[in-house]
Amino acid sequence: MKLETFGWNSYFASHFKQHAEAGFSVGRVVLEHKNFYRVYTEHGELWAELSGKLHYLATSRQDLPAVGDWVVIQILGNEDKATLHHILPRKSRFSRKVAGSPTEEQIVASNIETVFLMSGLDADFNLRRIERYVIMARASGANPVIVLNKSDLCAEVAQRITEVESVAHNIPIRVISATQGSGLNTLQSFLSPGETVALLGSSGVGKSTLTNVLAGQPLQQVREVRYTDGRGKHATTHRQLILLPSGALIVDTPGLRELQLWVGEEGFKSAFADIAALAEGCLFRDCRHREEPTCAVKEAVKMGTLEASRFENYKKMEKELELLATLQVHKAARLQKGKWKNGRHPSNQGRKRR
């Protein structure tokens, strides 16, 4: 197949030019499995392994390939294997902080045009979780679309839409039932040939079901969801890039029960633009909306024009980002100290050996 089938365009071609002149090939990462990567290429699907140099120079997970990446490879003879040498610059990436204590970025999917933020309209519906997904999606560089699934299990669809609109300003909202096949036509405008869409949401929202419906065949395993809380087990265990009959590509991801923030201050503020606008009326320019007098934000909560739970979520995520920023500074200092110990301090560069 042609590379354009997998989303290749002039942006990636311009960055690959120097590698092409050196005799390398290019492919797109379809699946990551331990230290191996399944790659789409013009010559078919190949298994690629990191070159020693790329593995050595990688200082964190973001320096390693992710599903959706375009990578520079060297095909090994007539085998269906290759060595992976470089990652081409990413146009977009949806990232989160690695679950647990490490201060490290995990790229969930890269080079995506659209993110389907999926939420079930069943017992697992959670507005605060949607709010968090919106923040992450806005920072990814891709276009977010909120997909409310399981409309057949909800008697208050209009009310749910209103609630979501209150936290997802100017983001398209689509209501579907993947199992019933209703509303799927509203997604087609985002599934053009060569376009890549990532499905994101917690376990049990119907990502695998939607993938199977769009693919026209049961590619992904589907598991039962508990009726009491709407939650399910991971049906998808690995992120995978799938080519659909429409020509679009879709990344089905495992359920993200824990979605720790990995965004900058601007992405956070844009997601809470309503609170930022209210803050213009605060007495102090640097008001933290806590104990300060004449706080327009707290007054809005008191008057009921700003939902209290939204404000509480805002404060919670603000503290989370402050902690993340502190941890990142400490990590950078540790890495720099390590370089000095290894003789890689900038002042040592260029010195001749005695």
Image (spheres, helix red, strand yellow):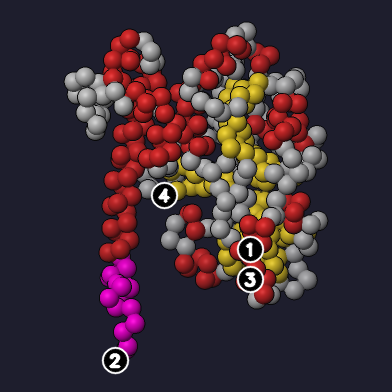
Per the image, the residue denoted by label 3 is 19
Q: Report the mark closest to the observer, 4 or 3.
A: 3
Callout 2: few (<14), some (14-19), or many (20+) C-alpha neighbours within 10 Å?
few
3D distance between C-alphas at marks 4 and 3: 29 Å
Relative to 257, 13 lies left or right:
right
Query: Sequence-wise, which precedes: disc 3 or disc 2?
Result: 3
Per the image, the residue denoted by label 1 is 14
Reply yes or no: does residue 95 show up in magenta: no
Would residue 345 be seen by someone viewing this image from the given angle? yes
3D distance between C-alphas at marks 1 and 3: 10 Å
Q: Which mark is residue 354?
A: 2
Callout 3: few (<14), some (14-19), or many (20+) C-alpha neighbours within 10 Å?
some
Q: Which mark is residue 145?
A: none
3D distance between C-alphas at marks 3 and 2: 37 Å
Reply yes or no: does residue 348 show up in magenta: yes
Part of the protein shown in magenta? 338-354
**Which amino acid is tagged 2?**
Arg
Q: Report the mark closest to the observer, 2 or 1.
A: 1
Q: Are marks 3 and 2 in contact (CB under 8 Å)?
A: no
Name the quadrant containing residue 283: top left
Q: Report the mark closest to the observer, 1 or 3.
A: 1
Whether residue 165 is situated above or below residue 201 in the rendered picture: above
As helix, strand or loop, the secondary structure at mark 4 comes to loop
Q: Which mark is residue 104?
A: 4
Relative to 39, 98 lies left or right:
left
Query: Sequence-wise, which precedes: disc 4 or disc 1?
Result: 1
Q: Quadrant of the C terminus?
A: bottom left
Q: Report the mark closest to the observer, 3 or 2.
A: 3
